[in-house]
Image (cartoon, rainbow, N blue to C red):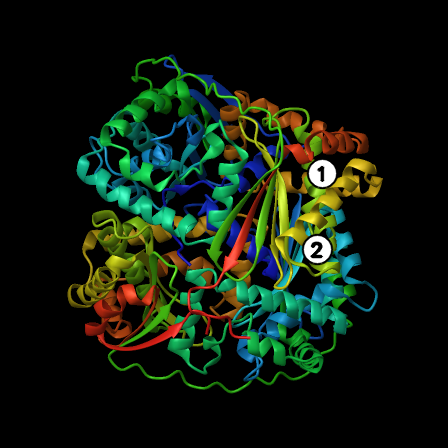
């Protein structure tokens, strides 16, 4: 689900915690030979709202996805979580509807509506059966345009958010992730958790929320995608009727602090004394989503550790040595330069072995590059897999909005596979050398500290902290 | 976090939710065949995209295990990726990905399912790979011992180092005393350690046979060509009689059971479960409607009461978790700091008692039915999802066509039905409670 409200996150967390994996329902609507999206109808309203409509008549379903090009990166210093709290409050009351009325209305039609913020954007989504199109559009426009941010609702959501942050501390993977972000990015906004911290959430006042809404929830900062069993003309007419009243203001984006430099191997050991497993994050800064080397980096990363069982890290650390259940690496897809991160977990005893294996594989790909077979297999994977990500209305909406948000260009979807096919071995080697730096890394290790501390000492400088901090 | 988790336990809850709900009028074409060796084949032609989903369902899961070898179904699923006569360890997935596809598998209480999703011109590859590992699996001491360690890591992650995983395992241990649902699909750690290669080979030989399997093909294909391909690769496997059904019947519970799990953590939580009948039983429909009324959406009774009004819980949810053998109706709540699991249970029981005493409002009933209709349609948004639905019904009920009857059964549920099943099953004597008691690490205090 796209709705990134607290509850659904918790539910996912819980379900994952004992069921481990949703065997992904794989859905397909694009062709394997060529990306044949249904026609995309784009228009910009007089107030600046961009509207994208895609007719998709497989099933009687419609997905709305509205993004605002301001996410938690716009949270002021000390108020991390503001964007997310603002988004979370949208469905908690408007000028004409209470929170419970909104819940009743959307539940009655078996639909979903929600909102949240990521680093680069805020989004509001709604999914309903096509026969309930009007209910969906009415609710979505109302929560975007007319939220009232009542004090009691703010208190309620603040309390929920605080409890959620506390609860994350029980999940060693989340602890590792949050610490890694902070460690790599420092005071740069990407170092702050989108949901905020216990301290920052307490600092956020109603005025901050109202101000955030006023400053960033404006049509010239927004794109709305409507995908599903609809008629474009009718959608445009109805969207205009609801959204044309929305007034715009100039957007001012906050300035951003540079992330701290990395010198050698810097280790942050996070003590969680009950753990029998160690959660590991290794990495440094990566690339911007718009980087022209995006495709060779993607191919290189797949071979190193992004490609599951086709990747070297999985082969070495799991398949050959049985040290972990999962290992993965990735470059963030963000507007600003994101992180490059390898993540895994292993028994406390094998922590250093796993870390050494990771560093060794990074060194190896920088020294030797990749084989012809690895390169060809990776290209086949991405060229075959790409169309499979355009299956449901929700997925299509997300894909086309990402193209807009990251300004990837009109031809991005059409030329994606040619871009993948064009990657050469030389480029892969070049980007491995350019964007991977095994000598200057930040490592976050969440474990029972006394079990692993001495084995980590030879690796580099170390700081020890508690999972509760 | 990790984007590729393979060979994991199936998302039992999600899949079953998707599969047991059928309220819309949507029906799609399915052709059914049976090979001489007993393999059931379901084919659904759908030309909306040149893609195919291939799935093989085995009617084996943790329900078929016994003490000493708990977790073997899941371990066996892992080993299905570790090589066969003509395919090396982990080669299966590499080949699929190198052909632009994806694959995975999952193990649940009742079944084990393997799937590939590919461009439809690659269907033969998927079929040949699945037949290969059904016929020629070659587990060795070496691959088995390294995969055992992988599975132990999976258990540590999901159960031993996760408060909610530990709570769920305890809830199963408490709720089922005789039936194999007593243990979690992952198995007990000592059993994972003690299962031998020989145990595994025997298990594979017994359950991985055509008469215990259903192959599902959904997508841009022609059924006549598909059945030829299936015959080509699966047809030469000799018939073996299907394995016996699970005989153990969970005895009627005679009184409430409560168990506690102490874990380092931040918030109390609890899980409550009531025994209910098996999937497909007529009472499952009103029970599912009851679950929608109690738990689904922010207007649901328990969200409104516990999360919104009292603000005593961070989250509460539940569902009618129907399985091949009698399953459970469960609720899970994570309490807010300062609220105890006992307070939460009290509120839950009040809400449950209300269901027994007052008929649900017609609008609430209509809402629940609308939610079920919507879930059903949204659960069909792909050829794979369609395949999963028919595969599940065929494997669990022995008849995929029952999927298409579900809509009417949900539509027929009345307020009186909901009241009747609430009285029948939500009885204190039939109740099982597992409570998560958060503790501090030694020598540490929470910063205030």
Residue A270: give x, y in percent of width and height.
37, 70
The residue lying at 71 percent from left, 75 percent from top is: A47
Q: From the viewer's perspective, is B322 left or right of A358? A: right
Residue B397: give x, y in percent of width and height.
54, 23
The residue lying at 25 percent from left, 68 percent from top is: A432
Residue B48: give x, y in percent of width and height.
53, 39
Is residue B244 at least partly visible in the picture?
A: yes
Q: Is residue B290 above or below residue B325?
A: below
Q: Could you give the CA–CA distance between mark 1 and mark 2, rounded to whole angstroms?
A: 17 Å
Q: Nearer the viewer, residue A249 or A82?
A: A82
Q: Nearer the viewer, residue B302 or A140?
A: B302
Mark 2 neighbour class, 10 Å CA radius: few under 14, some 14 to 19, many 20 or more: many
| Eye-nearest disc, 1 or 2 | 2
Mark 1 neighbour class, 10 Å CA radius: few under 14, some 14 to 19, many 20 or more: many
Element assignment for label 2: helix
In the rendered image, which residue does mark 1 sit on? Answer: B290
In the rendered image, which residue does mark 2 sit on? Answer: B306
Q: Quadrant of residue A429?
A: bottom left
Element assignment for label 1: helix
């Amino acid at each position: 689900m796209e709705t990134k409200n607290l509850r659904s996150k918790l539910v996912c967390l819980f379900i994952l915690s004992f069921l481990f994996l949703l065997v992904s329902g794989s859905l397909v609507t694009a062709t394997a030979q060529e990306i044949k999206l249904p026609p995309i109808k784009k228009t910009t309203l007089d107030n600046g709202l961009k509207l994208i409509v895609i007719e998709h008549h497989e099933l009687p379903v419609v997905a709305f996805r509205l993004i605002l090009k301001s996410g938690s990166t716009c949270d002021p210093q000390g108020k991390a979580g503001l964007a997310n709290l603002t988004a979370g409050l949208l469905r908690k009351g408007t000028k004409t509807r209470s929170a419970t009325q909104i819940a009743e209305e959307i539940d009655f039609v078996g639909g979903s509506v929600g909102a949240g913020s990521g680093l680069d954007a805020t989004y509001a989504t709604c999914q309903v059966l096509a026969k309930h199109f009007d209910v969906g559009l009415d609710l979505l426009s109302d929560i975007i345009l007319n939220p009232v941010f009542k004090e009691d609702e703010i208190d309620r959501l603040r309390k929920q958010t605080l409890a959620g942050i506390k609860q994350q501390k029980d999940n060693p993977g989340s602890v590792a992730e949050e610490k890694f972000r902070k460690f790599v990015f420092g005071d740069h906004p990407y170092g702050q958790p989108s949901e905020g911290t216990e301290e920052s959430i307490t600092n956020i006042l109603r005025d901050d929320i109202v101000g955030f809404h006023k400053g960033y929830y404006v049509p010239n900062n927004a794109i709305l995608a409507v995908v599903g069993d609809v008629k474009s003309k009718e959608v445009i007419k109805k969207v205009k009727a609801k959204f044309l009243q929305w007034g715009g203001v100039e957007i001012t984006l906050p300035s951003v602090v540079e992330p701290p430099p990395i010198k050698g191997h810097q280790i942050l050991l996070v003590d969680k004394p009950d753990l029998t497993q160690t959660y590991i994050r290794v990495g440094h800064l990566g690339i911007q989503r718009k980087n022209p080397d995006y495709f060779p980096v993607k191919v290189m990363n797949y071979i190193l550790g992004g490609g599951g069982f086709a990747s070297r890290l999985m082969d070495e650390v799991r398949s050959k040595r049985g040290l972990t259940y999962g290992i993965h690496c990735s470059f963030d897809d963000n507007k600003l330069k994101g992180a490059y991160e390898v993540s895994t977990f292993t028994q406390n005893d094998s922590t250093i072995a796993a870390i050494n294996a990771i560093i060794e594989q990074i060194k190896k790909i920088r020294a030797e590059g990749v084989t012809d077979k690895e390169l060809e297999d990776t290209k086949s994977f991405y060229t075959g897999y790409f169309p499979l990500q355009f299956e449901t209305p929700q997925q299509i909406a997300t894909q086309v909005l990402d193209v807009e948000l990251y300004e990837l260009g009109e031809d991005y979807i059409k030329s994606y596979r040619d871009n993948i096919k064009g990657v050469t071995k030389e480029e892969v080697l070049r980007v491995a050398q350019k964007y991977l730096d095994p000598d200057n890394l930040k490592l976050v290790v969440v474990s029972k500290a006394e079990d692993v501390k001495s084995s980590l000492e030879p690796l580099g400088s170390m700081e020890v902290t508690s999972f509760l901090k | 976090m990790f984007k590729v988790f393979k060979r994991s336990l199936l998302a039992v809850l999600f899949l079953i939710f998707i599969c047991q709900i059928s309220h819309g009028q949507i029906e799609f074409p399915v052709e059914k065949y049976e090979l001489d060796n007993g393999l059931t084949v379901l084919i659904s032609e759908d030309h909306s995209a040149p893609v195919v989903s291939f799935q093989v369902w085995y009617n084996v899961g943790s329900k078929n295990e016994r003490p000493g070898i708990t977790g073997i179904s899941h371990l066996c699923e892992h080993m299905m990726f570790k090589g066969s006569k003509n395919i090396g360890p982990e080669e299966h997935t590499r080949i699929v990905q190198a052909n632009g596809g994806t694959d995975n598998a999952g193990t649940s209480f009742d079944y084990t399912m393997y799937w590939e999703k590919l461009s439809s011109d690659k269907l033969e590859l998927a079929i040949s790979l699945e037949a290969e590992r059904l016929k020629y699996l070659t587990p060795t001491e070496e691959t088995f011992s390294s995969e055992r360690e992988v599975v132990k890591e999976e258990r540590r992650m999901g159960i031993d180092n996760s408060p909610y995983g530990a709570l769920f395992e305890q809830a199963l241990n408490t709720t089922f005393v005789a039936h194999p649902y007593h243990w979690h699909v992952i198995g007990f750690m000592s059993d994972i350690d003690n299962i031998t290669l020989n145990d595994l080979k025997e298990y594979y030989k017994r359950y991985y046979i055509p008469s215990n399997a259903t192959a599902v093909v959904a997508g841009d294909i022609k059924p006549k060509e598909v059945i030829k391909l299936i015959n080509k690769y699966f047809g030469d496997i000799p018939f073996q009689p299907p394995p016996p059904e699970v005989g153990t019947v969970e005895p009627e519970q005679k009184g409430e059971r409560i168990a506690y799990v102490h874990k380092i953590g931040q918030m109390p939580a609890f899980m409550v479960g009531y025994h209910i009948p098996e999937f497909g039983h007529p009472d499952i429909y009103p029970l599912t409607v009851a679950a929608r009324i109690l738990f689904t959406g922010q207007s649901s009774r328990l969200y409104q009461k516990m999360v919104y009004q009292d603000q005593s819980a961070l989250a509460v949810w539940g569902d009618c978790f129907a399985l091949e053998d009698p399953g459970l109706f469960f609720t899970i709540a994570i309490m807010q700091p300062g609220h105890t699991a006992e307070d939460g249970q009290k509120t839950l029981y009040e809400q449950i008692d209300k269901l027994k005493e007052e008929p649900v409002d017609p609008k609430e009933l209509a809402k629940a039915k609308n939610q079920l209709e919507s879930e059903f349609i949204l659960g069909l948004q792909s050829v794979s999802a369609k395949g999963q639905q028919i595969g599940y019904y065929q494997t669990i009920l022995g008849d995929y066509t029952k999927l298409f009857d579900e809509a009417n059964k949900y539509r027929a549920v009345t307020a009186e039905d909901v009241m009747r099943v609430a009285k029948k099953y939500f009885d204190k004597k039939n109740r099982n409670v597992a409570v998560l008691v958060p503790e501090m690490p030694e020598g540490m205090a929470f910063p205030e």
